[in-house]
Image (tube, grey):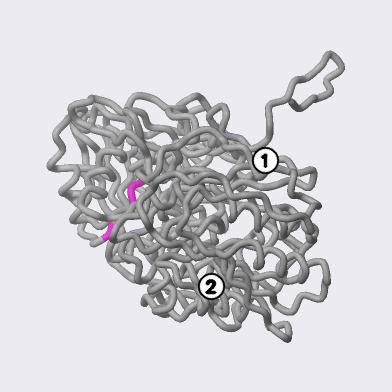
Amino acid sequence: MGAHRTQRPGVASASIGQHHAPLAPSPPRLPVRSMRFSVLTAVCDPPPDVLAACLDSVRSQMTDDVEHVIVDDASTSADVRDLLDAAARCEPRITLVRHDTRSGIVAASNSALDAATGEFVALLDHDDVLADDALAVMNRAITASTDLAYSDHDLIRPDGRFADPVHKPDFSPERLRQQNYITHFVVARRALVVEVGGFGVGFDGAQDHDLLLRLSERARDIVHVPEVLYHWRMTAASVALDPNAKQYAYERGRLAVAEHCERIGIAAEVELGRHLGTYRVKRAATRASTSVLIAASGGSATVWGRHRPHLAALLDSLADDRSMIDEIIVAVPAGDGSDGSDGTLDDRISRVVTHAPDASPFAVAARAATGDVAIVLDEAMMLDAGSSLAELLALLAGPDVAAVGSAQFHPDGCVRHGGLVVQGGTVASVLFGWHRDHSGPGRLMDVNREVSAVDLVGSAWRMRELRELLDTATLDTATLDTATLGVRTCLEAAADGRRVLWTPFTAFTRCDRERDNEGVAHPSGNATAIETPDHDRYYNPSLVPGRADWLELPGRAGAPPCTVDGDGRRHWS
């Protein structure tokens, strides 16, 4: 992973609009380890000045061993054809291929792949721009086992300024099934691209997502470089400016995800998601013996205008999912005379167990349970209308999945739990306090995705593993809040190579306390008991540490700094 640093200056504007001028001498190259890159660009009638900037960005790369393979897909613009001819004459590293008839982005990209000679291919659209050191940074990040690498990117606004950097997580296969969160900049080992069949015929518009899915199925090592190495131009025909610009691409993306699921053995229906560019992978229903473990203490609150015991409200909310629940175990404090249901044992409860003040209610409930799967809840939760436990159970069926966490909201609709960011001795809930109707940066609140940890409450586990994690605790679990306990158990599972997932499709409202700052980063607990990584791989080093609201560090944004005068008008330097 390359070192993160501040935004680099973009492509000089001198060449913009001067596409007939002779090309200037190439800049001096940095001495880097030799690795040949083939930059693949399919060209089809872009504005000539935009194409000139694209060509200049490859010519300006700070590494010598690069070729630019350009396929002109029967452009009708004489200016575009002349520009490509002039560039090919002046720059020996350009390989120009021409199609006599227009064949589409997939065919043009495959022609570029056929002509490439580099060990790695890099994908660049004809209206976009690479940072000057893009290939040099990738060169340093790639190892002998790297088959796929990608970077962060930003946008080039219509006024030419850089803006809206997209700070991505390290490789997140579940999220990639839900959306092409990687997009640009992508570098892949050419031999593997050829092995998986190149760009998929029939996937025009979603060809990159389809290729990334197929590469991810076979890649030995996938590297994320957390630097903005690619500038995606916002044009009238670009999805970067208008997500509706290529409606056809979304159905092809859905098909790409469906075929990927079939190839890797995920039985699922794939639907278009709530937002363009997202997909809903609905796994086939699984049936495992399931125990719901509930910590209760006889609390109550006003729910929908009616004062009710917490536990009764929770059980009511689970009514539609009762067929997938084999037993409900309720753990209550010993000696307080409460069975957790305000004095009356509810016939929906299979068993009530008691726990000492210094014992974890979940450990006691887990030991009493008979199911193969545990769903851990608190009495003050309610399953949201239209939501279901089915998503937790379906995702947990993945053989390498250790735990699945749910979306949790305060009664006012603001996020309480969106998965946990764990780094540098702190824990923070993703987008804590944001309203549930906001999909978050990169639509991350609308898709299933990997996270470093989840709150133990509201999550699903295999019972055997949950018992082991709770019973072999190296600390007194009763003294820890459940978020911290969830962190400990998730980190231990991740150390064994298991994944932890979060889903928005099982959602709870929690009524046990008023909104406070509990989601803001806080110490992770006893340092000797929980050792957190320096960096959370599903966060990004360009984001402020100790938070989980995707606040960017100063100097990372593409847009230049601005000042605001006394009238409130902004002035950019």
* Residue that mark 1 sits on: 163
Q: Nearer the viewer, residue 402 or 146?
A: 146
Whether pointer 1 and pointer 2 mark residues with C-beta atoms closer than 8 Å, the reply is: no
Q: Secondary structure at mark 1?
A: strand
Residue 317 can be seen, yes or no: no
Q: What percent of the width, then of the height, locates residue 151? A: 49, 50
Q: Residue at x 82, y 66 (%)?
A: 79
Is 263 part of what is drawn in magenta? no
Total labels drawn: 2
Q: Quadrant of residue 374?
A: bottom left
Residue 270 image label: 2
The three-letter code of the residue at mark 2 reads Val
Give above or below for 544 relative to 468.
above
Looking at the rendered structure, the kind of residue marked 1 is Ala
Give the mark nearest the N terminus, 1 or 2: 1
Q: Position of residue 284 (x, y in %)?
A: 43, 74
* Residue 455 visible in the current orientation: yes
